Image (cartoon, rainbow, N blue to C red):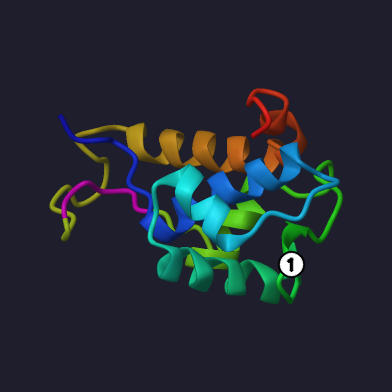
Amino acid sequence: MGNILKISEAASLALHTAVILASNPKRLISTKELAEKLHASEAHLSKVLQRLEKSGIVQATRGPKGGYRLGKDSDQVTLLEVYESIDGKLAYSDCLLSECICNGDCIMGKLLSDLNSQVRDYLTKTKLSQLAKNISRF
């Protein structure tokens, strides 16, 4: 069964990484350690981390004892901010079809519009600190 909500692998890695970093605020975590924890390609995660760093969400410390930590307080970073730093502005679609055929009132009603609003609201209201409380430290 497919997921009703599609999210890119890069955005998923970014969200997971940000929550892990939020749950370990005093610790630098290496790309290698994060990649192992997330079962992800170190190369792909490195690109994601570069984009998160560029947006100021994470902060890198270079060198043999280096790694990443959040660049902002976890109470100040929303899931939407993390998502949009990777995939750009959250895009909406009011139709399940690639080309709308309804000419006015959609057969599906306001289903997609309502779902889009609920997802945006959740991503906007949810801070990294809220999700960090739900995971065990590693």
**From what the image shows, is residue 3 above or below residue 71?**
above
Q: Give the residue pinned by disc 1.
A: 66
Pointer 1: residues within 10 angstroms few (<14), some, or many (20+)?
some
Does the image show residue 57? no
The magenta segment is 93-97
The foreground one among 24 and 121 is 24
Question: Left or right: where does residue 78 sit relative to residue 34?
Answer: right
**From what the image shows, is residue 96 above or below residue 56?**
above
Q: Residue at x 58, y 50 (%)?
A: 17
Secondary structure at numbered mark 1: loop
Residue 118 picture location, percent across and down: 52, 33
The foreground one among 123 and 56 is 56
Magenta-drawn stretch contains 95: yes
Does the image show residue 15? yes
Identity, as a three-letter code, of the amino acid under mark 1:
Gly
Question: Left or right: where does residue 28 sit relative to residue 7?
Answer: right
In the picture, the quarter occupied by the N terminus is: top left
Residue 104 picture location, percent across and down: 26, 48
